[in-house]
Structure formats: C-alpha cells, structure tokens
Amino acid sequence: MVTPRVVARSEELKGHLGMVAFSALVAGSFSFGGRIANEIDPMALTAVRFLLAALVVSVIAGSAGQLTREALRASWRYFLLGGLFGSYFVLMFEGLKTAHPVSTAAVFTLTPVMAAGFGWLIMGQVTNRRMALALLFGAVGALWVIFRGDLAAFLAFDVGIGEMIFFVGCVAHALYIPLVPRLNRGEGVFAFALGTMVGGAVLVVALGAPRIVATDWAALPVLVWAVLAYLVVFASVASISLIQFASMRLKAAKVMAYTYLIPSWVILWELVLVRDVPPVVILPGVGLTILALVMLLRERAV
C-alpha cells in the first residue's frame, strides 16, 4: 500500500532531480552568455528570449491541455513574476559584460540565503539550525570565490561592478522562488510558466523598446543566435519549468540550494568550451558550496 508519506517522498525526489537538471542548464547560460554579453543589448536579448520561449511553451501547454480559462485568472500574478524573472536575466547579462562567468555564478549562490528569508516572510517557511548552517557555509564559499580568497579584498569590499549589478538581479530571483507556490492557484506547470514568460516579455518589451529597435539584428554574429537558441530552449523553457515544478515540492531554501552546484558546473563548462582552468585559490570556496548542498540534501524535512 502506498502511503501519503511515500508519495510525498517520491514527489520530493522528483523536485530534487529537476533541480539537478536546472543547475546544469543555468550554468551553461553563464558560460555561453559571457561570450555574447557585449554583442547585444541585454534588454533586447531578454525580450526576444522571452517571446520565443513563450511561443515554445504555448505549444507545450496547449498539447498538455493546460491552456484553460482558469489559467488566465488574476493575470497580475504573471506580470509580477515575469517582471522579477526578466529583471534577473537583464541584470545577469549586464553583469557578464565585465564579470567572469565563474565569479558571476558565485554571486548567484548567495540566492539561497535570500530565498530562505523571503520564504519565511511570504510562506512562513522556517529554516532550522542545520539548514541555516548549510546556508552559511554556502554563503562563505560564494564570497570566497567572488573575492578569490583575498581577505583584504573582502574587508575593503573590493568587488567588481559586474558582480554588484548581478547581485541586484539575484535579489529579484530569490523573491521569485517563494512567490511561485504563493501565487499558484492550481495551474499546470507549463501554463504557469507561459504566463510568467508572457508577463516578463510584455514588461521587457515595453521598457526596452528603444534598445530593441536600435539593435541591428541582421548584423549580429552567428554565435549570438546560437546562444539565443540555447537560452530559449534550455535556460528559459526548461529551467523555468523545472524551477516551478520543484518549487511546488520543496522549500524555497532547498530549491535554491542547488545553485550551490552552479559554480562547479560553470567550471566544467569553461573547461569544455575554452579550456579555462580556474585558479586553485577559488577551489576551497567551491568545496564549501558543495558541502552546503550535501548538508541541505540530508535535511529531511520537506
């Protein structure tokens, strides 16, 4: 007999597997995005990315029978979530203009601490002592990578402008996580993702119209279009669906715990793409982020 506890554990496992895939796909967006950040305006890139992703997801949602009248209720939710997600992507590419992909990924690993705080404020999700310790280890590891193990740079808060810009985007991303289960009213994953992407696309297009019009689309390098395809299919459609799927099954802090894997994934992406071997001094920081992930995975409460 399948008990409710077994079902709950099964759903939690699905959430974990979804976040493993999410972390690998998002890591690719840092590595690929860093190579085109100075080739196209971030607002223009994000607008096209959201519009194309919305087209893909609309087909999937329609095929899954999720495009119902009920899914359109309280459309303001999609503008709120889409605005937060759009802000994250725009600021990510602004940051990548000057910041290294590994360093930027390390900034992203500060998100779980903020997500835990927002999860408590919005959903009443309590972070126990073990999770708090894990989040602390992850934050220390992230700061180690960002400041490259240089205590003097840390004390002087000698952080690059690119990292600072992206940090603001990470705040928006952290707020987005607990808002997903808070605002979801039973819509399917793809219908909810579609609403989020359409809301984000409308806002980004409205705010970035002059930049979009000023972009010489015909003159863009082939690499930009190739990266855009990756961002649409994998870093937008797949990742937004995965994170919303996981957010319905895991605590906000545990969902964002998988961001601790991203610097390691980015290092692997950089090794494959350009054989860029990271400095040894950052490895202890990466190790701490992995330790934080392991601690959070061993934390049993859903």
Image: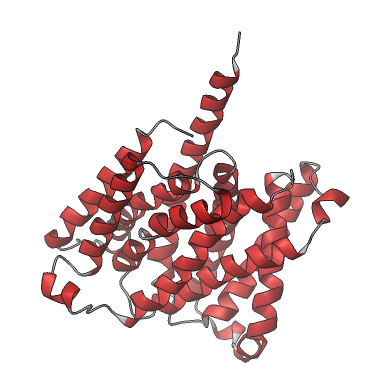
Please indicate whether residue 279 sits to the left or right of residue 61 in the image.
left
Seen at 32% across and 75% down, the residue is: 99
Q: Which of 285 and 121 is in front in this view?
A: 121
Q: In which quarter of the image is the N terminus?
A: top right
Q: Nearer the viewer, residue 202 or 112?
A: 112
36 lies above or below 212:
above
State the count of labels: 0
253 lies above or below 229:
above
Q: Which percent across, then down, holds residue 121?
A: 53, 56
- Which image quadrant is residue 97 in? bottom left
Seen at 51% across and 40% down, the residue is: 250
Q: Which percent across, then down, holds residue 178?
A: 56, 53
Q: Which colour scheme is used?
A: secondary structure
Q: Does residue 68 show up?
A: no
- Which image quadrant is residue 83 in? bottom right
Q: Which percent across, then down, holds residue 268?
A: 30, 53
Q: Nearer the viewer, residue 4 or 20?
A: 4
Q: Does residue 152 show up?
A: yes
Q: Which percent across, then down, holds residue 110?
A: 36, 60
Seen at 38% across and 62% down, the residue is: 108
Seen at 44% across and 48% down, the residue is: 253
Tell which residue pokes out farthest to the right in this image: 69
Please indicate whether residue 167 sits to the left or right of residue 295 in the image.
right
- Which image quadrant is residue 2 in? top right
280 lies above or below 228:
above
